[in-house]
Structures are given as C-alpha cells and as structure tokens.
Amino acid sequence: MSSEYVTLKPNPGFCVKSTTLQAGSYTPSAPNTPSGNVAIEEPLSRTTISIPNGLKVFINIAWDHNVPPPPEGVEEAVKKAYFEGADAPDDDVYVPVVVSDGRQDKDKG
C-alpha cells in the first residue's frame, strides 16, 4: 500500500461517545509527515497517558475530499459479509481512513 501526504481540513460528520471499560495507557506516536505537508496536528506530548476505567472517550467521524473513496465493489462486499455473517477477505473490503493521535481535551458537559 502506498503512502500519500495531503493537507486535510476535515468537515464534521458525527461523534460517537463511549466510556472505557478497563484502565490502560496510551503513548502518542511521533509525527511522520514530511516537512510542509502536515496532515494531522502534532501530539501535545510524547508522554504516556494513563487511561482510567470509566473515562469518557469521543470518536469524531469527519470527511474530506482529499481522502480517496473506496474502490468499486466495496459496498457489495460489506453487505454480503453483513447479511451472510461471513468474513470478507481483506482484499475484498478496503475503506480508506485517516487516523490521528488522541488528544486530551476537556468535555463541555
């Protein structure tokens, strides 16, 4: 799979709010984008973050025109796997995603 660096300005989609079921830890990865092409915000810190049981977690789903669409036929493969309960082979289902490091923000609530 090839790597391509683009600048993203995500458009809001929806947010999934969840809660951790067990304690853990998270260490942000080092930025690996070439100079001048920043696709995500740099992490605030490389320090390991302690994640307590019961922590609220928000997963923001957004979109951008610079992220390519999935290849033809993916929708049919996903429907087949969903309705037939079969595992779809990895090469049948590929949905491009961009994932950034977590952030420690304050909840508005």
Image (cartoon, grey):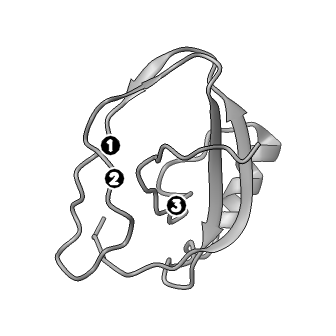
Q: Disc 1 and disc 3: Cα gap in Å? A: 25 Å
Query: Of helix, strand and loop, which one carries label 3?
Result: loop
Q: Residue at x 18, y 74 (%)?
A: 34
Percent from the top left, x then y, of residue 48? 31, 30
Q: Which mark is residue 94?
A: 3
* Amino acid, disc 3: Tyr
Residue sitting at x 53%, y 18%:
52
Mark 1 or mark 3: which comes first in sequence?
A: 1
- Which residue does the image show at 77% across and 55% down from the upper left? 79
Q: Residues within 10 Å of mark 3 (few under 14, many from 20)?
A: some
- Residue at the left extreme? 35
- Which of the marked residues, 2 or 3, is nearer the chain's N terminus? 2
Judging depth in this view, the residue of 84 and 64 nearest the camera is: 64
Distance of label 1 from label 2 (alpha carbons): 6 Å
Q: Picture quarter containing residue 76?
A: bottom right
In the image, residue 109 lies at what x, y percent? 77, 42
